[in-house]
Image (tube, rainbow, N blue to C red):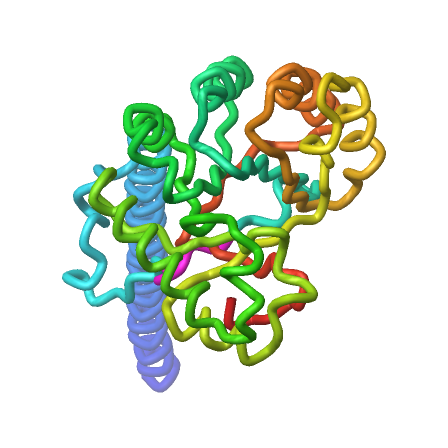
């Protein structure tokens, strides 16, 4: 009897143990299955996110957002980065830019139209420092030079050394330039502020004189290369040689005059500058830089 009871107990224990093992195996299988499903869901979600991101990236790369989306940055909470004064780029693609500012004094004249024709052939513009008493006789060519992108600089009313400088005061000088400035404004519709002092600013214009010019609202340019063309009638070759031997700076302001010999020399001067890698620039008030003999930052 004891043996049977023991066997019966052993049998019951064996059956219970078997059921527990079966349930445990099922729980393990369900756990693994759940984990596998979770990993699969996460994998699918991740791949979907990556695919959507790649799709947007490709779409933006192939077809960038319209300009209107960034047209008014302040409305998007951004800060507009456009500078008040345009800065002239010093380098382009790692190379220092070489700029040539062609300037002509003592016009307008019967040579102005021909000079403009030559400039146009070379896709160049220039800065013309004009004498006020000659404006009325050449109104059309002044309008043309402005229309074609050249700048109408001021060169006094009379170009008279004694009247401009001998008094020792800046009064006559400033008065002449203000009068010419008003004439040009009435002729072309805007007010130029760049001047060139007849005979250059040195040595006749001192510090106080320069301060008076600045106080009148003017900027003043001299030059870096003097062609001496005014003193070389009938000798265009010498004008070309002089300019060629003088230019070497990254920025050159080349002084020439409205003369017959200059008309003859100009095509070769422009070609020489092009061959040396110079770009032709015209004075831009929004990108003013200092080009007076004294280096006066007020001008």
**Front-most of residues 18 and 42:** 42
Q: In x, y percent, where is residue 193? A: 38, 56
Image: 269 above or below 209: above
* Number of numbered tags placed on the structure image: 0
* For residue 298, side relative to residue 171 (left or right): right
Q: In x, y percent, where is residue 275? A: 73, 21
The residue depicted at 44 percent of the width and 51 percent of the height is 156
* For residue 103, side relative to residue 217 (left or right): right
The N terminus sits in image quarter: bottom left
Q: Is residue 237 magenta?
A: no
Residue 145 occupies quadrant: top left
**Front-most of residues 239 and 235:** 235
* For residue 131, side relative to residue 240 (left or right): left
Q: In x, y percent, where is residue 194? A: 44, 53
Residue 131 occupies quadrant: top left
Image: 84 above or below 227: below
Q: Which stretch did the figure color magenta?
A: 83-87
Q: Residue furthest bottom?
A: 2
The residue depicted at 74 percent of the width and 19 percent of the height is 236
What is the chief secondary structure element of the magenta stretch?
Answer: loop
Q: In x, y percent, where is residue 180? A: 34, 50
Taking the image as drawn, is residue 78 in sight? yes
The residue depicted at 49 percent of the width and 20 percent of the height is 111
Taking the image as drawn, is residue 25 in sight? no
The residue depicted at 64 percent of the width and 23 percent of the height is 262
């Amino acid at each position: 009897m004891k043996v049977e009871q023991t066997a019966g107990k052993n049998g019951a224990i064996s059956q219970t143990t078997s059921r527990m093992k079966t349930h445990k195996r099922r729980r393990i299988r369900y756990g693994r299955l759940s984990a596998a499903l979770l990993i699969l869901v996460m994998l699918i979600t991740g791949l979907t996110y990556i695919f959507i991101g790649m799709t947007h990236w490709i779409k933006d790369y192939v077809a960038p957002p319209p300009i209107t989306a960034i047209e008014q940055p302040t409305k998007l909470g951004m800060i507009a980065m456009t500078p008040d004064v345009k800065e002239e780029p010093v380098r382009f693609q790692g190379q220092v830019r070489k700029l040539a500012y062609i300037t002509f004094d003592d016009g307008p004249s019967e040579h102005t139209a021909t000079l403009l024709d030559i400039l146009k052939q070379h896709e160049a513009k220039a800065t013309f420092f004009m004498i006020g008493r000659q404006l009325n006789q050449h109104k059309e060519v002044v309008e043309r030079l402005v229309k074609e992108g050249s700048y109408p600089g001021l060169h006094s009313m009379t170009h008279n050394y004694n009247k401009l400088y001998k008094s020792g005061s800046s009064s006559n000088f400033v008065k002449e330039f203000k009068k010419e400035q008003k004439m040009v404004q009435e002729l072309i519709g805007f007010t130029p502020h760049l001047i060139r002092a007849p005979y250059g600013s040195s040595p006749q214009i001192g510090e106080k004189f320069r301060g008076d010019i600045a106080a009148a609202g003017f900027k003043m340019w001299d030059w870096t290369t003097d062609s001496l063309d005014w003193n070389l009638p009938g000798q265009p070759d010498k004008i070309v040689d002089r300019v060629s031997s003088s230019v070497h700076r990254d920025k050159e302001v080349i002084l020439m005059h409205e003369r017959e010999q200059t008309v003859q020399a100009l095509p070769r001067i422009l070609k020489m500058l092009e061959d040396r890698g110079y770009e032709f620039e015209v004075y831009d008030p929004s990108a003013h830089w200092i080009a007076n003999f004294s280096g006066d930052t007020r001008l």
